[in-house]
Image (spheres, coloured by chain):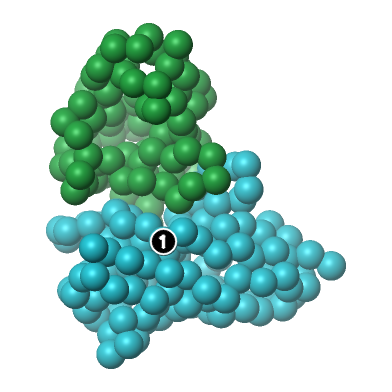
Amino acid sequence: QTVVTQEPSFSVSPGGTVTLTCGLSSGSVSTSYYPSWYQQTPGQAPRTLIYSTNTRSSGVPDRFSGSILGNKAALTITGAQADDECDYYCVLYMGSGIRVFGGGTKLTVL
Amino acid sequence: EVHLVESGGAVVLPGGFLRLSCAASGFTFHDYSMHWVRQTPGKGLEWVSVISWDGRNTYYADSVKGRFTISRDNTKNSLFLQMNSLRTEDTAFYYCAKGSSGTITSPEYWGQGTLVTVSS
């Protein structure tokens, strides 16, 4: 069974730029996987950042952008802020109606 | 403003059943697919199920297929998840989410979740 992979953790300096990725244990991610990205702080419901590769959800600042980089989906955060420190999840459309989340990336801003 | 409120979470015995509800407002409910996503406390997100705007098409994660049934009532702007043969590993917060625009949708707007605990 194909697993959706994310970096378990990542760190970025305040004001810096970070790119988180979302891949497959077997194969390459393309726009046909309709990658979406979510942000979640502890105890809160997820917040949608990006869907369908690069469409920002309503109210999401343009510091957040989605793309395909090589064989993975990518979420790039520019001008990192302290409140960007939380968990980030991606989800991929695997076909036949099935979606699969990645295991999440814990982002530290320091 | 999109507003989703889940209800129905409870403590239930293994092998038991539960029906979750999600009340939707702030958008044209019958125009959008709807998802259920769950999260074991302290763990990651797991996609559970999706239903098309008209209720004709439903899909499930392998972990719940054959035990859970998603449905909707477009006259009442409501989404449901019937959960049967519950297992301890079904313990989680269950979120309903409005699908994004487009043919292939992802969860976009989320409720605050309802907690299901399966324990003896």
Residue type at mark 1 is: Gly
Colour in which the image shows chain B:
cyan
Identity of the residue furthest to the bottom in this view: B75
Residue at 23%, 30% in the rendered image = A64
Residue at 70%, 64% in the rendered image = B117
- Which chain is mark 1 on? B
- In the rendered view, does A5 fall on the left or right side of A17? right
Considering only vertical position in the picture, is A45 above or below B25? above
Task: Please count the marks in the image.
Answer: 1
Give the position of the C terminus of chain A as an image quadrant. top left
Expressed as whole percent of the image width and height from the top left, the position of residue B87 reads 71, 65
| Label 1 packing within 10 angstroms: few (<14), some (14-19), many (20+) | many
- In the rendered view, does A53 fall on the left or right side of A1? left
Rendering quarter of residue B26: bottom left
Rendering quarter of residue A109: top left
Rendering quarter of residue A55: top left
Q: Mark 1 = which residue?
A: B111
Q: Can residue A71 be seen in this view?
A: no
Q: Is residue B55 visible?
A: yes
Expressed as whole percent of the image width and height from the top left, the position of residue B11 reads 72, 70
Considering only vertical position in the picture, is B74 above or below A100? below
- In the rendered view, does B18 fall on the left or right side of B100? right
Expressed as whole percent of the image width and height from the top left, the position of residue B68 reads 54, 73
Residue at 54%, 40% in the rendered image = A42
Expressed as whole percent of the image width and height from the top left, the position of residue B78 reads 37, 80
Please name whichever residue, B27 or A29, is drawn nearer the observer in this view of the structure.
B27
Label 1: element kind: loop
Colour in which the image shows chain A:
green
